[in-house]
């Protein structure tokens, strides 16, 4: 029995075993059969879009700021774009760079490129100067489509970008171009590259990971068809940037899996979010990172419950916010998932279980890891060691011909993510760098990024757990936690950077009491820095690098506090505090 067949059997058995799921099981399994697509099959992003357009030409495909584009209309526009790109020399296998913000023309350009059998390299339009130049350099593109809204980013480059086509010229030339489906679309195979997805660059320069049509198709089947299960009358709202995999792969594939509608938002606005959801008649939306917490931090409004949303899908909804979020906004189902742009595996909460990253039918392992190196730990015989049910370990994904690792554009970077001869000679595993908890029944819960976890007093501290505890204080709007070195002490001490709600004052005693009540003593941060704002990436990931570098050095723009003890709480920082910690004089128990 092949790995894919075993995965399908797991889906059937689990769906039938859960209360209320048996009736939905046949449809779930039917939708999930897309994971059986083989690398040589004619299966591609463009072909799935094209088939929907032929089947449902009058059904709404895209909604944007009140404008509706139906499937047939959108397909004709995409074909005209493809005709112009082909005239500009774009051929199957080429790479086309796209530097544009969220708007319909961006999505049309993306679909036009993949319909030609070429690869889309979507650039982060927030990047500037050498970082943007580095990203363009990774593409090796034959053409670069640049939106007028990104002129500032383009002008920041030290050297002129070659082979530029403005999106305005593309749109103008497309008005009179051929609207016939390009012949190449029906010939593209699953093994070919669809997208180059850039990492967010929270540390160092971005890398470009490869998304093949095979992985995209399996996402459509597993996350979209099996997990999310949109219907033809559903509208999925997405205000995440299109250069991000959640928008380009998860949201788009889920819409096409159900023949549903994609409501595209220009950008995220916490204050205007529900108004836009209501205007676009959305029945679902996709989230990432801290978006849900931002919504919870907004004052309560009637619009919180005046929407049609029946489900939400995304990753990063913290367990401590799960119930509060669903109850306040009346969300019936949370389809949390785990995945990464480059990882050959995904988990999805297909069965409506609270506080889980979901179910993963593909081969994976959760193994012990070395605290010092962050690498998977090998036993005396040189093999990896799995953790037991309920344990926390490093998540690895099996890599083979049926579950390939497509890698990055940089071969050395790709090889660095692989573990060879893990359990037996010749096997290969992808190192996700993530710590997860084995929940049993092929379910996991995300714990932390291994690079973010630190060790203090001989114990591992998960930053997400500490951030969740501190965020429960009424005055704290946001918390970011990391480890800092203290001379003369082993490991790294916990430090938090927090922002406060407007008008709130820092409550050192109350915050310490809350932290001690919700965390083991070794996990309570010794340092707290109150800042006006916390810098984030455009996909709401905290930038911790600069905060780690600053450590507990004082500055004029923030207020620094230190933990005096369980009773005394956090007090203003003083010069000899680190030495007192190393000597064991503080914090008092």
Image (cartoon, helix red, strand yellow):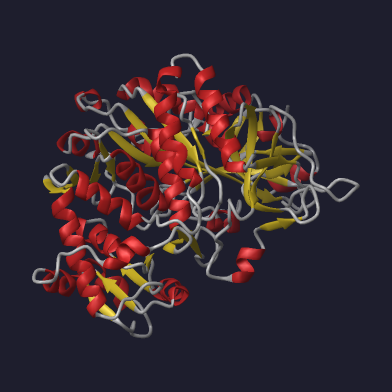
Query: Which residue: 16% across, 71% down?
Result: 168
Q: Is residue 250 visible?
A: yes
Q: Percent from the top left, x then y, of residue 550?
A: 57, 57
Query: Horizontal placement of 465 versus 143: left or right?
Result: right
Q: Percent from the top left, x then y, of residue 311?
A: 34, 29
Query: Horizontal placement of 53 versus 294: left or right?
Result: left
Q: Residue furthest left?
A: 176
Determine which quarter of the picture holds residue 580: top right
Vertical relation: 458 (above or below) 484: above
Q: Quadrant for the C terminus, please.
A: top right
Depth check, front residue: 394 or 362: 362
Q: Quadrant for the N terminus, please.
A: top right
Query: Which residue: 51% across, 50% down?
Result: 340
Q: Is residue 561 visible?
A: no
Determine which quarter of the picture holds residue 313: top left
Vertical relation: 103 (above or below) 117: above
Depth check, front residue: 66 or 190: 190
Vertical relation: 223 (above or below) 536: above
Q: Residue furthest top?
A: 19
Query: Which residue: 41% across, 48% down?
Result: 540
């Amino acid at each position: 029995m092949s790995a894919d067949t075993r995965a399908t059997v797991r889906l059937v058995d689990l769906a039938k075993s859960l209360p209320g799921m048996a009736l939905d099981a046949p449809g779930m399994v039917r939708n999930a059969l897309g994971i059986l697509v083989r690398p040589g099959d004619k299966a591609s992003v463009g072909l799935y879009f094209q088939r929907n357009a032929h089947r449902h030409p009058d059904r709404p495909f895209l909604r944007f700021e009140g404008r509706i584009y139906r499937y047939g209309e959108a397909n004709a526009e995409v074909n005209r774009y493809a005709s112009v790109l082909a005239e500009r020399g774009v051929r199957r296998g080429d790479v086309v760079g796209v530097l544009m913000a969220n708007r319909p023309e961006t999505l049309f350009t993306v679909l036009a490129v993949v319909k030609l059998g070429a690869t889309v390299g979507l650039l982060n339009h927030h990047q500037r100067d050498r970082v943007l130049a580095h990203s363009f350099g990774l593409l090796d593109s034959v053409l670069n489509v640049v939106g007028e809204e990104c002129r500032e980013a383009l002008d920041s480059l030290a050297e002129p970008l070659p082979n530029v086509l403005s999106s305005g010229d593309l749109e103008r030339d497309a008005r009179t171009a051929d609207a016939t489906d390009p012949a190449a679309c029906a010939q593209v195979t699953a093994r070919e590259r669809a997208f180059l997805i850039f990492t967010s660059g929270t540390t160092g320069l971005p890398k470009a990971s490869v998304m093949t049509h095979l992985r995209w198709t399996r996402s459509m089947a597993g996350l979209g068809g099996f997990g999310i299960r949109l219907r033809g009358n559903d509208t999925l709202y997405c205000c995440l940037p299109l250069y991000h995999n959640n928008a380009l792969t998860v949201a788009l594939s889920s819409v096409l899996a159900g023949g549903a509608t994609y409501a595209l938002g220009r950008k995220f606005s916490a204050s205007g979010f529900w108004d836009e959801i209501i205007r676009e008649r959305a029945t679902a939306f996709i989230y990432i990172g801290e978006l849900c917490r931002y919504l919870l931090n907004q004052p309560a409004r009637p619009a919180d419950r005046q929407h049609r949303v029946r489900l939400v899908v995304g990753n990063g909804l913290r367990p401590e916010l799960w119930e509060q979020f669903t109850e306040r906004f009346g969300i019936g189902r949370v389809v949390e998932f785990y995945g990464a742009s480059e990882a050959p595996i995904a988990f999805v909460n297909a069965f409506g279980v609270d506080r889980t990253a979901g179910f993963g039918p593909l081969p994976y392992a959760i193994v012990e890891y070395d605290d010092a190196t962050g690498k998977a730990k090998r036993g005396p015989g040189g093999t990896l060691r799995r953790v037991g049910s309920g344990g926390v370990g490093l998540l690895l994904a099996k890599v083979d011909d049926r579950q390939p690792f497509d890698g990055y554009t940089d071969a050395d970077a790709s090889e660095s993510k692989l573990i060879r001869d893990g359990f037996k000679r010749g096997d290969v595993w992808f190192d996700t760098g993530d710590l997860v908890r084995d929940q049993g029944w092929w379910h996991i819960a995300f714990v932390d990024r291994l690079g973010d976890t630190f060790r203090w007093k001989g114990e591992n501290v998960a930053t997400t757990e500490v951030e969740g505890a501190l965020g429960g204080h009424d005055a704290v709007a946001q918390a970011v936690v990391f480890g800092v070195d203290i001379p003369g002490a082993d490991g790294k001490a916990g430090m938090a950077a927090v922002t406060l709600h407007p008008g709130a004052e820092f409550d050192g005693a109350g915050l310490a009491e809350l932290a001690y009540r919700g965390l083991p003593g070794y996990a309570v941060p010794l340092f707290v820095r109150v800042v006006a704002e916390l810098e984030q990436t455009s996909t709401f990931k905290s930038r911790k690098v600069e905060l780690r570098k600053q450590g507990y050095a004082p500055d004029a723009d923030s207020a620094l506090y230190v933990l005096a003890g369980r009773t005394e709480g956090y007090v203003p920082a003083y010069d000899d505090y680190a030495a007192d910690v190393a000597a064991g004089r503080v914090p008092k128990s």
